Amino acid sequence: MHDKTLTQLAKALGSGELSSRELTEHYLQRIQQSGAILNSFITVTADQALEQADTADQARAKGTASLLTGVPLALKDIFCTQGIKTSCGSRMLDNFDAPYDATVVEKLKTAGTVTLGKTNMDEFAMGSSNENSYYGPVKNPWDLTAVPGGSSGGSAAAVAAGLTPAALGTDTGGSIRQPAAFCGITGLKPTYGRVSRYGMIAYASSLDQAGPMARSAEDCAHLLNVMAGHDVRDSTSVARGVPDYAETLNAPLSGLKIGLPKEYFGEGLDPEVEKAVREAVSVYESLGATVRDVSLPHTHYAIPAYYVIAPAEASSNLSRFDGVRFGHRCDDPSDLIDLYKRSRAEGFGDEVQRRILIGTHTLSEGFFDAYYTKAQKVRRLIRQDFLDTFEDVDVLMGPASPTPAFDLGAKKDPVSMYLQDIYTIAVNLAGIPGISVPAGFAGGRPIGLQILGTHFAEAQLLNVAHQFQQTTDWHLQRPDFAEESA
């Protein structure tokens, strides 16, 4: 069962070939048998999942089910889930049971999906390797000595290992696309504002966006159909109609204009990754697409601009975790200042503290204009680069990461870790959608092809990705770990 895609499982449930309880029990058993090896889950909600599965089966019997009714999913532990621990991978929230559901969780529950549990992540979504979690690092099922990527590494690893058919992630600077690439699955970052952020614990409010992670573009389309839409509780949610993302998956690609940004194929790109990406582009040419070189001239400013803006917003967002209202509180504080200092020092890990300090510095008097204001001006130039380019091409293609997954512990220098996001960060600064799809291997570790589109072009991206997956079988490959744990 775990070799099937979410779409295939939905069809099997609809035909009566499977019951949701059978399917849920199967995945819970797999999580129990091998989940600890990967450390991909923080919380497993077995009892709730079985109750939801029974409810889904009853809905199927009554004929009131939707397409995804009874399909099991996992949620990154950044989404509030009523009555269940929502930790954000941090000691700060290790004791926090959310009092309400995030909008996307609410929407998925309404659609009848089953929640298997909450997946591991870099603390407060700050990281590119899933080594920054209070609950320990996640391992890549393709190679247990490698990272799964981050910050949505737990979700990516769980899908790749067949512990869940799909999972939710969040993407602030590549945190869906990079782990999807590292783990050989499909991950979609929608346009900023396309999916509600209500109930999604904030890292950087102008950059964060939730999205689906699954085996295929078709799976992601069905999930986005449920997740997308305006939410009055989220002021950044866009009031715009939601198309049926599955409806155009099979549209032909003849006449598609693809741009290859020259900045994505320069120094630092692993030759094996470049080879795989260019071979993937040649597949599109065989499907009737045309390819041209383009330029995004401000790309090299993306990382410095991001690491001013994101930490500044994190400094503001995380100020609420002070040991008073909720979250970790130190023992026996001597006074209020001691309570603040020790609660935050004990509750936050090194990377979170580092980014809070950077953000507080850049927002401070005398530095705000020199750093934060200037970074926002650069952000506008980066966005304009994309808008100008999309006047001439339909989509952009390139690598999702400069290398395949690196070894656990290999990136001890924070700056070298930050450089892993060189091809993904600009997308969040511009607010455009992007998707990573499996496109090959290097040394047994997966490679991801990144496809970018203009604002609200998710339907086109999913169509382009789906047609590639109809022609290739990279997305059908499974790690040995998935079969050994069967």
Image (cartoon, rainbow, N blue to C red):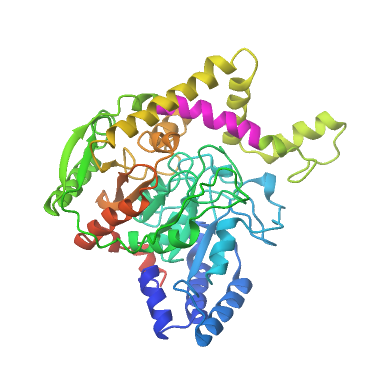
Identify whether 31 is placed above or below 324. Answer: below
Picture quarter with the N terminus:
bottom left
Left or right relative to 340: residue 348: left
Picture quarter with the C terminus:
bottom left
Residue 277 percent location from the top left of the image: 22, 44
Identify whether 466 is placed above or below 427. Answer: below
Q: Which of 412 and 433 is in front in this view?
A: 433
Helix, strand or loop: magenta stretch? helix
Residue 178 percent location from the top left of the image: 39, 45
Q: Is 375 one of the magenta-colored residues?
A: no
Residue visible at 22% across and 38% down in the picture: 259
Residue visible at 31% across and 52% down in the picture: 460
Residue 215 percent location from the top left of the image: 36, 61
Left or right relative to 247: residue 354: right
Single out the residue that lies furthest toward the top. 366
Residue visible at 39% across and 43% down in the picture: 455
Q: Which range of residues does the magenta coloring cover?
A: 302-317
Identify whether 99 is placed above or below 205. Answer: below
Left or right relative to 445: residue 127: right
